[in-house]
């Protein structure tokens, strides 16, 4: 199977969903309801089933975490530097733009593409990276955004809120619970696991439909040069750094290198837009970057998949 053949169903499903939403065959409220079912039920069932039944290696290679998140935070800081030269000081703005450069869409696109190209063996590295993704990146973003602000005294409260949100989030929560069940050797009623496996088959198509239909509410709204800078950092520079660290600095299993690089070349995560709304800055810029990076990610994913020998 060629890269184009592997990616075609993914792109086609998302594109058809966007067309259906764009033509208002379904309303935006219908799309939001479908998104809730997908991200609060279908994907958590798939992630729980996958992590509860996967085979953990006897020795976990933590070099994966070092390589991936070192690259994430380097690019985050570089994105902040670019924002500083473009806009000057402003912690919230710096944090939002830095996050846009470094926060990949690992859930909606990363999981289905990794599983399609790498198979179910990729569940272990996916589990390791996604389980702490929001906790690490959002915590760093909040620290930067709250720095020197008057309400910075409430930083501890903000971070505690992030931690609780990660634990209660259906995505990260299902990964953590599935991992605990697996490592503790907890037996689960066999028909129940078969039911979860059946539900899991619907999760990836549902995620792609949600992505495509949901993109209808994001538009390119200006600041194109800066949005293109964020897109370039996210789609090309970040995965290049992850590839360099995993190939030449940290030694690890080939499959884990492939998973880390593929996850890192996904488009800008939609959660960055939520973060920008929270701090009331760069909303239009982030929306433009999300649209541009989603369209152009077809090329970045194809390039890095070819580079990885897939």
Image (cartoon, grey):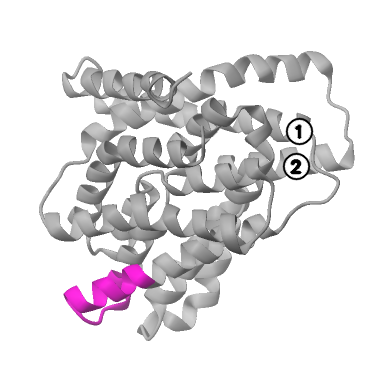
Instruction: Please tell me how crowded label 2 is: few (under 14), some (14-19), or many (20+) other residues with Cα within 10 Å.
Output: many
- Taking 126 as reference, is 214 above or below it? above
- Taking 177 as reference, is 77 above or below it? below
Quadrant of residue 49 in the image?
A: top right
Quadrant of residue 272 in the image?
A: bottom left
> Residue 210 at what x, y percent from top left?
37, 28
> Residue 5 at what x, y percent from top left?
41, 19
Number of callouts in the render?
2
User: Which circle's residue, 2 or 1, is located before the other in the chain?
Assistant: 1
Residue at horizontal 58 percent and vertical 40 percent from the top: 170
Q: Which residue is mark 1?
A: 52
- Taking 298 as reference, is 21 above or below it? above
Task: Kindly check if marks 2 and 1 are in contact, taking CB atoms under 8 A apart as contact.
Answer: yes
The answer to whether residue 92 is magenta is yes
Q: Alpha carbon of mark 2 to alpha carbon of mark 1: how far?
A: 6 Å
Is 165 left or right of 84, judged from the image as shown? Answer: right
Residue at horizontal 41 percent and vertical 65 percent from the top: 75
> Residue 197 at what x, y percent from top left?
67, 18
* Mark identifier at residue 139: none
The answer to whether residue 195 is magenta is no
Residue 133 visible from this viewpoint: yes
* Mark identifier at residue 179: 2
- SS class, disc 2: helix
Is 82 left or right of 5, judged from the image as shown? Answer: left
Residue 275 visible from this viewpoint: no
Quadrant of residue 267 in the image?
A: top left
Residue at horizontal 41 percent and vertical 46 percent from the top: 265
> Residue 200 at what x, y percent from top left?
60, 21
By secondary structure, the bulk of the magenta-drawn segment is best described as helix
Residue at horizontal 37 percent and vertical 58 percent from the top: 237
Give the magenta range: 78-94
């Amino acid at each position: 199977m060629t890269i184009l053949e592997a990616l075609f169903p993914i792109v086609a499903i998302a594109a058809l969903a966007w067309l259906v939403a764009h033509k208002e065959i379904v309303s935006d409220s219908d799309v939001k309801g479908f998104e809730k079912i997908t991200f609060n039920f279908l994907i958590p069932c798939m992630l729980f089933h996958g992590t509860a039944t996967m085979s953990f290696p006897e020795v976990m290679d933590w070099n994966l975490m070092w390589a991936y998140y070192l690259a994430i935070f380097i690019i985050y800081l570089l994105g902040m530097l670019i924002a500083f030269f473009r806009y000057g000081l402003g912690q919230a703005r710096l944090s939002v733009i830095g996050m846009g450069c470094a926060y990949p869409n690992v859930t909606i696109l990363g999981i289905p593409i990794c599983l399609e190209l790498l198979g179910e063996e990729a569940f272990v590295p996916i589990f390791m990276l996604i389980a702490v993704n929001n906790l690490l990146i959002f915590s760093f973003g909040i620290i930067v955004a709250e720095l020197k602000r008057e309400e910075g005294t409430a930083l501890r409260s903000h971070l505690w809120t992030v931690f609780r949100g990660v634990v209660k989030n259906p995505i990260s929560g299902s990964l953590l619970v599935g991992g605990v069940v697996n490592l503790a050797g907890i037996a689960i009623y066999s028909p129940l696991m078969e039911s979860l496996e059946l539900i899991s088959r619907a999760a990836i198509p549902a995620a792609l439909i949600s992505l495509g239909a949901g993109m209808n509410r994001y538009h390119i709204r200006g600041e194109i040069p800066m949005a293109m800078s964020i897109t370039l950092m996210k789609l090309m520079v970040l995965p290049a750094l992850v590839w360099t660290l995993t190939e030449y600095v940290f030694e690890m299993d080939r499959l884990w290198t492939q998973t880390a690089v593929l996850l890192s070349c996904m488009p800008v995560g939609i959660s960055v837009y939520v973060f920008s709304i929270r701090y009331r800055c760069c909303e239009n810029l982030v929306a433009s970057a999300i649209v541009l990076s989603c369209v152009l990610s077809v090329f970045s994913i194809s390039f890095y998949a070819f580079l990885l020998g897939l």
